Amino acid sequence: MLSAINRNIVRLQSEQVSAFVGIRRLDDPPPPTAREVLHEITLGPQVIDGVKLHVSSIRLFANSGVEEHGPPVYEVVVGAPGIGAI
């Protein structure tokens, strides 16, 4: 069960919401995708600080960039079991 503060974060009722939208902390983003793959969007469960959340990874214009690294991967909390979508 989520604590009251975690429930408020998931429902966007906390000043800590910005911690749940961000860029993966990598030295450099991964290389670009194949030319045919314009955007990458995935959805899956993640456990963050002991709280199970539904997280979407979004990479816009994934096929752009240079050979070594492409655009950033954004991660957004989109819900939590028992609470539903934000």
Image (cartoon, rainbow, N blue to C red):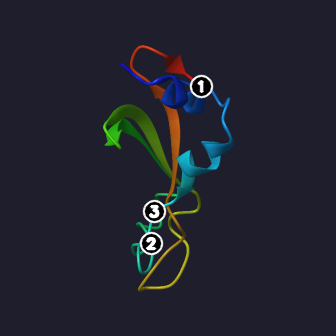
Amino acid identity at mark 1: Ile
Q: Nearer the viewer, mark 3 or mark 2?
A: 3
Query: How far across and how far down the image is residue 61, in percent?
Result: 58, 62
10 Å crowding of disc 1: few (<14), some (14-19), many (20+): few
Amino acid identity at mark 3: Arg
Per the image, the residue denoted by label 1 is 86
Disc nearer the start of the sequence (3/2) = 3
* Distance from the alpha carbon under mark 1 to that under mark 2: 30 Å
Amino acid identity at mark 2: Pro
The C terminus is located in which quarter? top right
10 Å crowding of disc 3: few (<14), some (14-19), many (20+): few
Query: How far across and how far down the image is residue 31, in percent?
Result: 40, 75
Q: Which residue is drawn at the image coordinates 62% and 42% (left, top)? A: 17
Per the image, the residue denoted by label 3 is 24
Disc nearer the start of the sequence (3/1) = 3
Determine whether, in the image, residue 74 is placed left or right of residue 53: right
Task: Judge by depth and name the residue closer to the eye, 4 or 85.
Answer: 4
Image position of 16 with respect to 72: above or below: above
Disc 2 on helix, strand or loop? loop
Disc nearer the start of the sequence (1/2) = 2
Per the image, the residue denoted by label 2 is 32
Task: Judge by depth and name the residue closer to the eye, 67 or 25.
Answer: 25
10 Å crowding of disc 2: few (<14), some (14-19), many (20+): many
